[in-house]
Amino acid sequence: MRGMAGYRLLVDDRKVGALNLFSDTVGAFDEAAGDTGALLAAFATAALTSASDHDRAETLTRGLESNREIGVAVGLLMAAHGITSDQAFGVMRRLSSE
């Protein structure tokens, strides 16, 4: 290895990886190569940010769906047993841990 350049990849201000470039040619990393590496790192960061945002959106969607199901279950317990929402939620919490 006769040349190397490294670029940090950040998503939401946290390091998630690096783009490391290596060369067998001395002096291969001139200013133009450095600019090209920075551009590649920017595209990689954009792709990683998009993937992270997609994962976050899916997690929030699953949470909302789960919350709706919990709300339905609480309502059914309230209607069936004549209890408050807090009591119904307590029943569900207790049963889920048993």
Image (cartoon, rainbow, N blue to C red):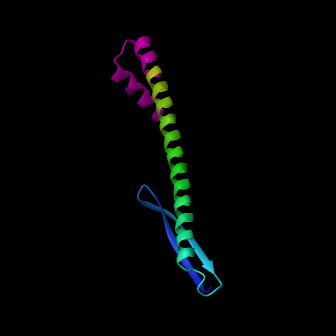
Is there any visible trace of residue 22 in the rendered image? yes
Instruction: Identify the residue at image location x=53%, y=45%.
Output: 55
Q: Is residue 98 visible?
A: no
Residue at x 58%, y 83% (from the top left corner): 3
Where does the image place residue 96, in percent across and percent down from the top left? 47, 32
Look at 50% across and 52% down and name the residue there: 49
Q: Quadrant of the N terminus?
A: bottom right
Q: Is residue 52 above or below residue 82?
A: below
What's the magenta bit mostly, secondary-structure-wise?
Answer: helix
Q: Is residue 79 magenta?
A: yes
- Residue 82 figure quarter: top left
Kindly identify the residue that appears in the image at 56 percent across and 69 percent down: 36
Magenta segment: 73-98
Instruction: Please say if 37 is above or below 91.
Output: below
* Quarter where residue 83 is shown: top left
| Up/down of 61 relative to 21, above or below | above
Outermost residue on the front side: it is: 32
Quadrant in the picture for residue 41: bottom right
Q: Position of residue 84 (x, y in %)?
A: 34, 17
